[in-house]
Amino acid sequence: MTSALYLEDLSVGQRFASASLELDADAIREFAARFDPQPFHLDEETARPTLFGGLAASGWHTASLTMRLLVDSDFKLVGGLVGAGIDELRWPRPTRPGDRLSAEIEVLEITPSRSKPDRGMVRVLITTSNQAGETVQSCIGRILVWRRPL
């Protein structure tokens, strides 16, 4: 287990990995029923003739699972993962029943705050992949990171 990191512990290009989790059809349908009740997320038969060609998880479900993977990953920050925004959120392929997802975080940019010297902003590329290594979600995140106390 990695100890919690401060802004000074991070460097551009640094990568962090998550464990993996498997998604099943029941979980896809349960999430969709509550938050994104579209036919291609709810029923295999109805989903077959659609663009997805079968049951597919909501992109928002994939995003929620990614957040879980990040919280449980090696990317442990002092004060937790405090998001300040997401850019370029993409779902290049559907997440399917039986997919085993994992996430990778790559540090893209580190910007110490000029007005608040106790913190900074870190831009990260977050890539969620399935068991075949295919990207099912990518985004650029902005995360507040605390500086080491003086």
Image (cartoon, grey):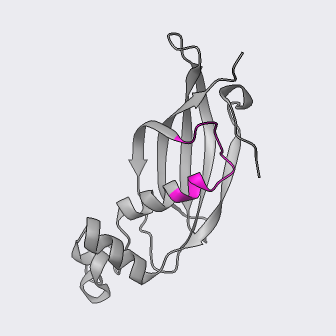
Side of 101 relative to 40 (left or right):
right
The furthest residue to the bottom: 45
Residue 88 placed where, x, y %? Answer: 41, 42
Quarter occupied by residue 77: top right
Residue 132 placed where, x, y %? Answer: 61, 71
The reply to whether residue 117 is in sight is yes
Q: Could you tell me what secondary structure mostly forms the magenta stretch? A: loop
Side of 81 relative to 47 (left or right):
right
Quarter occupied by residue 92: bottom left
99 and 145: which one is in front?
A: 145
Q: Which residue is painted at 58% across and 30% down in the image? A: 145
Side of 20 relative to 65 (left or right):
right
Q: Is residue 72 magenta?
A: yes
**39 is higher (above) or lower (below) than 65:** below
The reply to whether residue 51 is in sight is no
Residue 139 placed where, x, y %? Answer: 47, 46
Side of 19 relative to 135 (left or right):
right
Quarter occupied by residue 121: top right
Q: Quadrant of the C terminus?
A: top right
Q: Which residue is painted at 36% across and 59% down in the image? A: 60
Numbered-mark total: 0
Q: Which residues are magenta?
A: 68-81
Q: Is residue 112 magenta?
A: no
Residue 134 placed where, x, y %? Answer: 55, 64
Q: Which residue is painted at 50% across and 38% down in the image? A: 82
**13 is higher (above) or lower (below) than 119:** below
117 and 112: which one is in front?
A: 117
34 and 60: which one is in front?
A: 34
Q: Which residue is painted at 75% across and 43% down in the image? A: 3
